Amino acid sequence: MRRIADLTPGSAKTDAKDAAVIAGAARTMPHTLRAINASDEDAAALSMLTGFDLDLARQVNQSANRI
């Protein structure tokens, strides 16, 4: 993916750029991606971590707004 990202305009690494690179690769070069099989336990753990990260991001935003 990094080689594909290097071909994309712009020098900054951003989530939006990463998403565009992955979507473009999936659309035009499906052989570059592989499926993963996650157990229900792994999916639940990932969901919990994602929610925790979202909560932290909101707290940072709230703290910055208070300042």
Image (cartoon, rainbow, N blue to C red):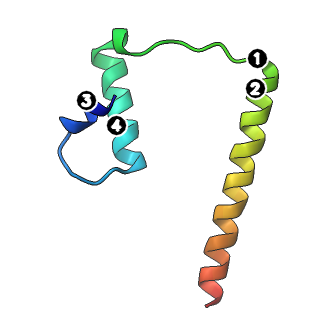
Q: Residue at x 25, y 30 (%)?
A: 3
Q: Earlier in the sequence, mark 3 or mark 4?
A: 3
* Residue 34: x %, y % from top left: 47, 12
Q: CA distance from mark 1 to mark 4?
A: 27 Å
Above/below status of 31 relative to 20: above
Residue position marked by numbered label 4 in the rendering: 20
- Label 2's element? helix
Marks 1/4 in contact by CB < 8 Å: the verdict is: no
Residue 17 x, y percent position in the rendering = 33, 44
Q: Which residue is mark 2?
A: 42
60 up-or-down from 63: above or below = above
Sequence-first disc among 3 and 1: 3
Query: How far apart in space, not on screen, are marks 2 and 1 (Cα)?
Result: 5 Å
Q: Which is more N-terminal, label 2 or label 4?
A: 4
Q: Which image quadrant is residue 58 in?
A: bottom right
Residue 1 location, x and y as percent? 34, 28
Amino acid identity at mark 2: Asp
Give the alpha-carbon distance from disc 3 to disc 2, as whole Å. 28 Å
**Local crowd size for mark 4, using a 10 Å CA cut-off: few (<14), some (14–19), many (≥20):** some
- Report if the CB atoms under discs 3 and 4 are less than 8 Å apart: no
Q: How many angstroms separate mark 3 from mark 4 (CA)? A: 11 Å
Describe the element under mark 3 as helix, strand or loop: helix
Q: Earlier in the sequence, mark 3 or mark 2?
A: 3
Mark 3: which amino acid? Ile
**Tag 3 and tag 1, C-beta contact below 8 Å:** no
Q: Considering the image in quadrants, where does the C terminus appear? A: bottom right
Instruction: Say if mark 3 contacts mark 2, CB within 8 Å.
Output: no
Determine which residue is flagged by label 3: 4
**Secondary structure under the numbered disc 4 in the rendered image:** helix
Label 1 is placed on what type of residue? Ser
Spatial CA span between label 3 and label 1: 29 Å
